[in-house]
């Protein structure tokens, strides 16, 4: 069940979007939000993901865009390609990120 603070925040967001972008903006925002929630629901079903030889336990990942990107194997694609292209896999490497 939604708490009053959640409802207030949602109404405030809707109010600001309506005043800045009109009814079409609210419609676009609602479509985006519904799509996000559907993607997140599907991502929650994924138990683990293996990207470039690294297996990630999805249970520990917060419900966020990061979880969706991992489930779709879209997480930091450009960065992963750059690492594969420019770093020698035979050499030791220092962690280049720290999100996960």
Image (cartoon, rainbow, N blue to C red):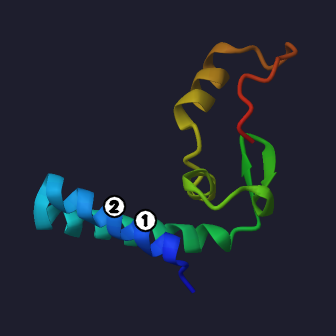
- Snapshot quadrant of residue 28: bottom left
Judging depth in this view, the residue of 37 and 21 nearest the camera is 21
Seen at 33% across and 61% down, the residue is 13
- Mark 1 lies on residue: 9
- Snapshot quadrant of residue 45: bottom right
Contact (Cβ within 8 Å) of mark 1 with mark 2: yes
Q: Is mark 2 on a helix, strand or loop?
A: helix
The mark found on residue 69 in the picture is none
Horizontal and vertical percent for residue 71? Answer: 62, 59
Seen at 25% across and 57% down, the residue is 16
- Snapshot quadrant of residue 54: top right
Instruction: Give the class, few, some or many, for how many residues have Cα within 10 Å of label 1's Cα (few <14, many ≥20).
Output: few
Horizontal and vertical percent for residue 29? Answer: 29, 63
Toward the bottom, the furthest residue is 1
Instruction: Give the class, few, some or many, for how many residues have Cα within 10 Å of label 2's Cα (few <14, many ≥20).
Output: few
- Mark 2 lies on residue: 13
Q: How far apart are marks 1 and 2 (CA)?
A: 6 Å
Q: What element carries label 1?
A: helix
Viewport quadrant of the N terminus = bottom right
Seen at 66% across and 24% down, the residue is 84
Instruction: Reply above or below: 91 against 45.
Output: above
């Amino acid at each position: 069940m939604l708490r009053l603070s959640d409802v207030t925040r949602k109404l405030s967001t809707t109010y600001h979007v309506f005043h800045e972008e009109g009814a079409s903006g609210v419609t676009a925002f609602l479509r985006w939000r519904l799509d996000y929630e559907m993607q997140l629901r599907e991502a929650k079903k994924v138990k683990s993901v293996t990207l470039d030889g690294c297996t990630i336990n999805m249970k520990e990942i917060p419900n966020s865009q990061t979880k969706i990107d991992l489930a779709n194997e879209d997480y930091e694609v450009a960065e992963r390609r750059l690492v594969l292209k420019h770093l020698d896999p035979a050499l030791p490497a220092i962690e280049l990120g720290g999100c996960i």
